């Protein structure tokens, strides 16, 4: 790919063509095809080429004008005073400010002994320049910059901007034109995009683009629905008004007329104070509620501004000092899959390295498949990457016009790239998940913690720190490995004395005797919380019965082509990213998509069982899948599907066999694990106070084993209140509602009779 280096003439023509196309898209269609930084780079390269080869500077070169031209659809407005642009210092450091100060001093003929020049320092708002013309205090025209000489009259749209008064406050001059920037705040931008997405309308890549698009609406009613803001920063034509002596005074006067002027401004004396302003604003840039791309320095005394004048349509008395861009364009070189701690498969874009937001970014999360489709990101695309403050870099959009060849859509894999278990997307979820919870290296730590937690196998002392070390050292891979741990393995760990190591060994040994319900819960089957695990244990009585039912249901569902037969929720095969994707978690948030899960401490999966969507129910009803699992109390199709899938996964079956082989056992007919009793079916109990021998948990388990329910509050529907010592308001409520009250003996008698 060694294309011949273009001649300066060819390169200049290329750049001119590029800039004209970018201008047309930006100014006429409000569609940025490049970031500011890219545009600036092309512009500067062309300027440099034309300076070095003056014969190349054509009359129509974009460097000869200051912006786009007025677009059709709006009435043209000739600016009484041209709207110029300002020179940009792109050096992201003190040098930019110091160079400006030195230039100003030189132009003014000041020597080292002369006093510091005073500057007005303000923000460089990232929006659209607008000229507001007030005649005798009334807003009569509002024009975009256009090409600097002629802009578009967008008055009807500007009238919908609440921040811009239709009438000036106080004594108004004959004519005053106030110039400033129309922009959109971050919160208004987010709300707009949310509404656009909900209405299946085009979303905007950034606030400036949204502001431009909104201002260029031919129907002001649409602009009125978009919240635009405004900051004034200067004047155009003025008749019948005496200007203040300084720019700072001018801004105060504009504020007194009732127009918004940004409070983040300062009067700075000399270059050093400009540097301090630049740095101070850099530090708060991420917290500003709107985008800025730099700061602007202006010589404060208007008389000095007049002395300095203009060069090549740029004032000598002002400069824009930019910050590192928060947006850049780059190329998507690949899309890989990361597997998070809870099994979420997250697509991550690998990017050609790009300097944005002050760091070099090489990847950006794409969140999930819906997001990829919505943004239509494909490998090979040129995209805009944004990184503001410490926020994780994200792809804000694709530069569609840069896609010159047909690129294939990205398809999510049907299996986990780490452990090759099937990947599964629940109907109610945007996230694709690995089903190999017990065996998947990416999920190991989480699975072990879930398995060991108090409400599961209850291994005291097996906390996060120990699990981290055991997994990182490669000593423990699956829960079964826990039962082969020797004292020596443990003593070698950080901050683990002999005594605590022995305690842990004992706790592990003790945990081998468990209940079927705890064991099922400990497996970390998605959608199966503690209560469902108990229901399953009671219903099936034995693990093999549960497995048989799950397998039979799974086979039938697959045969009927419902549920998991759809697998990953996406049709098609292949598309898996490189298997080592998970090793680089930098700059991504693999499990962000799971943040909304109702999870209790240490739970691998949520214990709440969300209701299926109506559409899903209809589909399930027609096909009648999972009849065996759905027969269990409170197990609906979504939960049944998850259970069926878990047990049909060979990896999980192997992990269970290993646990049994390592001595994990339970009594398959003990209370709390046997088939559900029915004697107390339909009865609701409320427990209150301290019982003499039973813990709350024991009492609850026994009532539930007999088919009863335990609830937290007393109502007329409560069958019994079981009261112990120091029973409080619940007992009072029971007496008030005439609900029978039992003590522990009475409860035990009731249970014995069942
Ligand atoms: S002064 C003659 N001040 O930046 C000087 N411009 O090239 C006129 N901008 O598109 C500009 N914030 O819309 C000035 N505080 C500020 C500004 C600002 C943003 C924009 C302006 C123009 C560009 C300057």
Image: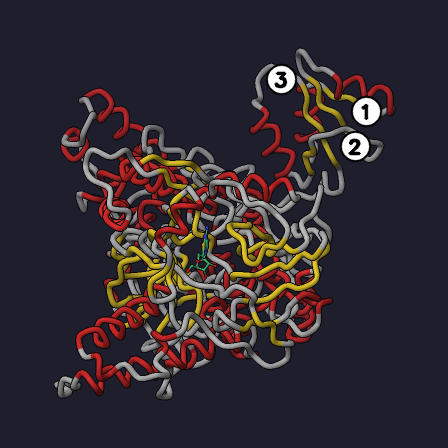
Could you tell whether 392 is left or right of 106 in the image?
right
- Residue 404 visible in the snapshot: yes
Q: Is residue 269 above or below residue 342?
A: above
Is 83 drawn above or below residue 171 in the view shown?
below
Which of the 4 quarters of the picture holds residue 663?
A: top left
| Quarter of image, res 55 | bottom left
Residue 691, labelled with which disc?
Answer: 3
User: Which numbered disc, 1 or 3, marks the residue that appears first in the sequence?
Assistant: 3
**Residue 255 appears at what percent x and percent y?**
60, 42
Q: Earlier in the sequence, mark 1 or mark 2?
A: 2
Q: Which residue is mark 2?
A: 719
Q: Is mark 3 within 8 Å of ligand 1?
A: no
Q: Is residue 132 left or right of residue 480?
A: right
Q: Are marks 2 and 3 in contact (CB under 8 Å)?
A: no
Residue 656 visible, this orientation: no
Residue contact at pointers 1 and 2, CB within 8 angstroms: yes
| Cα gap from disc 1 to disc 3, whole angstroms | 17 Å
Residue 510 vs residue 604, the one in the foreground = 604
How many discs mark residues in the rendered view?
Answer: 3
Q: Which mark is residue 740?
A: 1
Tell me if the residue at label 1 has its CB under 8 Å from ligand 1.
Answer: no
Pointer 2 local density, CA inside 10 Å: few below 14, some 14–19, many at least 20: many
| Residue 173 on image: x %, y % | 67, 49
Any mark on residue 215, and which? Answer: none
Residue drawn at (79%, 32%) of the image: 719
Q: Which residue is depicted at the point 68% across and 34% down?
A: 710
User: Measured along the vertical axis of the image, is residue 711 above or below residue 62?
Assistant: above
Q: Position of residue 357 (x, y in %)?
A: 33, 53
Residue 71, quarter of the rendered image: bottom right
Quadrant location of the C terminus? top right
Q: Residues within 10 Å of mark 3 (few under 14, many from 20)?
A: some
User: Looking at the image, which residue is at 55% across and 52% down?
Assistant: 185
């Amino acid at each position: 790919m060694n294309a011949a280096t273009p001649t300066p003439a060819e390169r200049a023509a290329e750049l001119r063509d590029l800039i004209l196309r970018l201008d047309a898209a930006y100014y006429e269609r409000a569609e940025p095809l490049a970031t500011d930084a890219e545009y600036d780079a092309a512009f500067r390269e062309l300027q440099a080429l034309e300076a070095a080869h003056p014969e190349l500077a054509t009359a129509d070169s974009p460097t000869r004008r200051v912006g786009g031209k007025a677009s059709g659809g709006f009435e043209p407005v000739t600016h009484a005073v041209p709207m110029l642009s300002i020179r940009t210092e792109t050096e992201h450091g003190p040098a930019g400010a110091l160079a400006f100060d030195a230039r100003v001093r030189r132009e003014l003929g000041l020597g080292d002994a002369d006093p510091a020049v005073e500057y007005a320092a303000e923000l460089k708002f990232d929006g659209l320049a607008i000229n507001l013309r007030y005649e005798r205090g009334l807003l009569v025209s509002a024009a975009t910059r256009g090409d600097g000489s002629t802009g578009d009259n967008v008055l009807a749209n500007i009238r919908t901007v609440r921040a811009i008064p239709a009438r000036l406050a106080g004594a108004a001059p004959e004519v005053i034109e106030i110039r400033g920037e129309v922009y959109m705040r971050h919160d208004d931008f987010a709300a707009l995009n949310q509404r656009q997405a909900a209405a299946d309308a085009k979303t905007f890549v950034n606030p400036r683009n949204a502001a431009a698009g909104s201002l260029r609406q031919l129907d002001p009613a649409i602009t009125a629905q978009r919240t635009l803001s405004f900051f004034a920063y200067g004047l155009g034509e003025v008749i019948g008004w005496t200007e203040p002596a300084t720019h700072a005074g001018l801004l105060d006067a504009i504020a007194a007329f009732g127009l918004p002027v940004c409070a983040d401004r300062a009067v700075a004396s000399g270059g050093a104070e400009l540097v301090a302003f630049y740095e101070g604003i850099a530090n708060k840039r991420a917290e500003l509620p709107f985008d800025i791309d730099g700061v602007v320095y202006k010589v404060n005394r208007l008389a000095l501004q007049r002395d300095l004048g203009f060069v090549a349509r740029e004032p000598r008395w002002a400069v824009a000092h930019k910050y590192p861009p928060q947006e850049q364009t780059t190329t998507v070189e690949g899309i890989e899959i990361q597997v998070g701690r809870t099994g979420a498969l997250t697509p991550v874009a690998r990017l050609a390295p790009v300097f944005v937001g002050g760091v070099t970014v090489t990847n950006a999360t794409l969140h999930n498949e819906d997001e990829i489709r919505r943004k239509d990101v494909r490998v090979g695309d040129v995209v805009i990457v944004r990184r503001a403050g410490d926020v994780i870099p994200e792809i804000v959009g694709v530069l569609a016009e840069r896609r010159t060849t047909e690129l294939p859509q990205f398809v999510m894999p049907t299996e986990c790239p780490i452990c090759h278990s099937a990947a599964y997307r629940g109907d109610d979820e945007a996230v694709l998940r690995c089903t190999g919870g017990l065996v998947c290296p990416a999920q190991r730590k989480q699975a072990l913690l879930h398995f060991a937690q108090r409400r599961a196998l209850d291994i005291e002392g097996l906390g996060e720190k120990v699990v981290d070390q055991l997994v990182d050292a490669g000593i423990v891979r699956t829960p079964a490995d826990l039962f082969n741990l020797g004292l020596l393995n443990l003593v070698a760990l950080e901050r683990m004395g002999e005594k605590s190591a022995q305690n842990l060994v004992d706790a592990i040994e003790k945990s081998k005797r468990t209940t079927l319900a705890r064991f099922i819960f400990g497996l970390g089957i998605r959608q199966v919380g503690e209560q469902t695990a108990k229901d399953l244990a009671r219903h099936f009585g034995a693990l093999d019965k549960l497995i048989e039912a799950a397998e039979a249901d799974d086979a039938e569902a697959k045969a009927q082509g419902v549920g998991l037969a759809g697998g990953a929720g996406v049709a098609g095969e292949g598309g898996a990213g490189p298997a080592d994707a998970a090793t680089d978690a930098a700059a991504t948030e693999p499990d962000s998509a799971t943040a909304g899960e109702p999870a209790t401490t240490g739970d691998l999966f949520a214990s709440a069982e969300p209701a299926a969507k109506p559409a899903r129910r209809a589909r399930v009803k027609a096909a009648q899948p999972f009849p065996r699992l759905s027969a269990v109390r409170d197990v609906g199709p979504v939960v049944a599907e998850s259970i069926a899938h878990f047990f049909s996964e060979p990896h999980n079956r192997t992990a269970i066999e290993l646990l049994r082989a390592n001595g994990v056992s339970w009594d398959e007919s003990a209370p709390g694990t046997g088939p559900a009793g029915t004697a107390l079916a339909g009865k609701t109990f409320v427990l209150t106070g301290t019982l003499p021998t039973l813990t709350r948990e024991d009492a609850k388990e026994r009532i539930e084993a007999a088919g009863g329910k335990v609830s937290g509050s007393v109502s007329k529907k409560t069958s019994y209140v079981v009261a112990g010592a120091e029973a409080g308001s619940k007992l009072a409520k029971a007496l008030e509602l005439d609900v029978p009250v039992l003590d522990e003996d009475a409860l035990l008698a009731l249970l014995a009779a069942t």
